[in-house]
């Protein structure tokens, strides 16, 4: 008897900011094929990650569990591939499964991908041009541009799948991760264009913690010749240097995004041409957000909105009404339970998310979460201090606890603990912390209590700086 459960295509990019997708209101680029998923399905306008780093985010997506539970707190901690993941559970339930692209969770010694009938992954970050891919049988050198190569592999695999068995395909791109090298079809895109500068490109980091000023991810100061692939001229001012770097880095970044959009169109066309569109759940997301010059930054890591927020769009014509938009709070660790739900597979109790399926239908379930919990563990890498926080629809509380806590990949260089509290309604750009404002005394107390409760609910261990508050 044929298995009528939906096929699942999950396209994941690396560092693609939601505000670099036109369906999210981008003013600097257009992404028609990615927009098509949202137009024909659902767009999640309040989707966040739980740890804005590549490997920790991917581990959270696979396991449906926070970093402290899945073991991947930083870029250099270890991922145990034997722990329950949604691909392994779907494979065990009868799905054909494949992974092509960026894994970034280690190789060998229990770190290789598990739960896939076929997999070919980059070695660490991998290369944009002529990448080497690792599979069960060893390494294979490929010629060409990585986004195109991975898409070709995905399409070739899809062409081989039987009609009577559902499939799960993970196409996990390298792009648009730093350093940015666009493919041949996008090399001259935006040539001669001048992009509008973000409103906070020249942020002075006043009214916030010292962590904001200490971060070594400033566009004008911390990008270099390898990022812009040209000799750096002399500048008359730091502002002139920042503007010059911004124009060059954002151009190549958006070119890389355009490559993902174009190849996503190839996959959607394939589903149309093979009659699989109606019974395929298509999901596009990024592992975290990215600063596009916002606050003068590139990179991610912070709990600030541009880094925290992820693009997340899904299409399943059989069930999801076209043009659905939801403002309910979603997390990247919800995806594991969402895919399992669509496949009719029970989620393990260790998973900590919730299925997004009702939200995708346009429903707002009673008791749905009213806050999200975030923790960044990699203390002082790129100068960003370790922090923990919660956000509601209106407020965000961030605590920089100033310690490495013995976590692999963090730098043992203590800082004085600090706090930030933002009123996202009156200050959506997060420029002015109101943590010490007497008018927010009650809000601060409520959010602090909520943070302690969120740590406990996540079965996490609070940093020592919170001990006096927990007593």
Image (cartoon, rainbow, N blue to C red):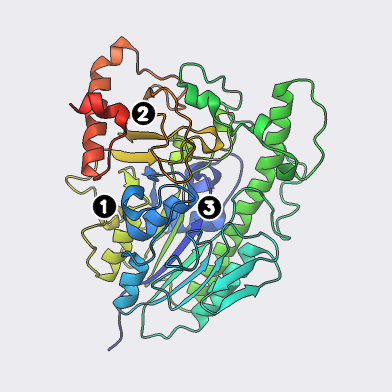
Residue 32 location, x and y as percent?
Answer: 56, 55
Quadrant where the image shows the C terminus:
top left
Position of 132 relative to 434 (above/below)? below
Q: Earlier in the sequence, mark 3 or mark 2?
A: 3
Residue at 60 percent of width and 74 percent of height: 139
Q: Of residues 140 and 165, which is closer to you in this image? A: 140
Q: Are marks 3 and 2 in contact (CB under 8 Å)?
A: no
- Camera-near label (3 vs 2) is 2
Residue 366 location, x and y as percent?
Answer: 17, 46
Q: Of residues 251 and 131, which is closer to you in this image? A: 131
Q: Which mark is residue 399?
A: 2
Residue 167 sits in quarter:
bottom left
Residue at 63 percent of width and 75 percent of height: 140
Q: Would residue 153 appear left or right of 129 to someone viewing this image?
A: left
Q: Of residues 265 and 16, which is closer to you in this image? A: 16
Cα distance between the residues tagged 3 and 2: 26 Å
Q: Are marks 1 and 2 in contact (CB under 8 Å)?
A: no
- Camera-near label (1 vs 2) is 2
Q: Which mark is residue 423?
A: none
Q: Earlier in the sequence, mark 1 or mark 2?
A: 1
Quadrant where the image shows the N terminus:
bottom left
Cα distance between the residues tagged 1 and 2: 22 Å
Instruction: Name the residue carrying label 3.
Output: 14
Q: Would residue 406 appear left or right of 362 to someone viewing this image?
A: right
Instruction: Name the residue carrying label 1.
Output: 352
Residue at 67 percent of width and 35 percent of height: 246
Q: Are marks 1 and 3 in contact (CB under 8 Å)?
A: no
Label 2: element kind = strand
Residue that sits furthest to the bottom in the current view: 1
| Residue density around tag 1, few if under 14, some if 14–19, many if 20 or more, within 10 Å | many
């Amino acid at each position: 008897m044929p298995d009528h459960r939906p096929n699942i295509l999950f396209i994941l990019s690396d560092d693609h900011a939601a505000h670099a997708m036109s369906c999210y209101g981008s003013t600097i680029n257009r992404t028609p094929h990615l927009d098509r998923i949202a137009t024909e399905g659902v767009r999640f306008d309040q989707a966040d990650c739980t740890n804005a780093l590549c490997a920790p985010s991917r581990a959270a997506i696979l396991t449906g569990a926070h970093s402290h539970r899945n073991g991947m707190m930083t870029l250099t901690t270890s991922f145990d591939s034997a722990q329950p993941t949604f691909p392994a559970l779907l494979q065990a339930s009868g799905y054909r499964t494949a992974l092509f692209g960026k894994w970034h969770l280690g190789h060998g010694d229990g770190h290789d991908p598990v739960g896939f009938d076929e997999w070919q992954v980059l070695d660490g970050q991998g290369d944009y041009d002529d990448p080497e891919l690792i599979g069960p049988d060893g390494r294979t050198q490929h010629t060409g541009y990585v986004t195109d190569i991975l898409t070709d592999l995905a399409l070739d695999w899809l062409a081989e799948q039987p009609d009577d068995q559902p499939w799960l395909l993970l196409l996990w791109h390298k792009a648009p991760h730093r350093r940015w090298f666009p493919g041949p079809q996008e090399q001259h895109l935006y040539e001669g264009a001048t992009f509008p500068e973000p409103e906070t490109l020249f942020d002075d980091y006043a009214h916030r913690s010292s962590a904001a000023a200490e971060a070594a991810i400033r566009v004008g100061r911390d990008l270099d010749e390898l990022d812009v692939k040209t000799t750096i001229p002399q500048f008359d001012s730091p502002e002139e240097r920042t503007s010059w770097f911004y124009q060059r880095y954002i151009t190549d970044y958006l070119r890389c995004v355009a490559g993902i959009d174009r190849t996503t169109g190839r996959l959607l066309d394939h589903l149309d041409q093979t009659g699989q569109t109606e019974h395929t759940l298509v999901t596009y997301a990024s592992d975290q957000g990215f600063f596009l010059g916002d606050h003068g930054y590139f990179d991610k890591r912070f709990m600030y909105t541009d880094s925290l927020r992820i693009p997340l769009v899904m299409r399943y014509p059989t069930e999801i009404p076209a043009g659905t938009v939801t403002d309910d709070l979603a997390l990247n660790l919800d995806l594991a339970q969402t895919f399992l739900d669509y496949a009719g597979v029970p989620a393990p109790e260790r998973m900590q998310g919730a299925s997004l399926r009702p939200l995708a239908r346009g429903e707002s379930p009673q008791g749905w979460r009213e806050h999200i919990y975030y923790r960044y563990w990699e203390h002082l890498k790129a100068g960003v201090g370790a922090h923990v926080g919660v956000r509601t629809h209106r407020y965000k509380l961030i605590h920089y606890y100033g310690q490495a806590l013995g976590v692999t990949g963090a730098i043992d260089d203590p800082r004085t603990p600090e706090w930030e509290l933002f009123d996202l309604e009156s200050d959506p750009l997060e420029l002015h912390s109101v943590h010490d404002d007497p008018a927010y005394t009650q809000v601060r107390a409520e959010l602090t209590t909520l943070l302690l409760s969120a740590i406990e609910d996540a079965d996490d261990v609070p940093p020592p700086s919170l001990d006096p508050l927990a007593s």
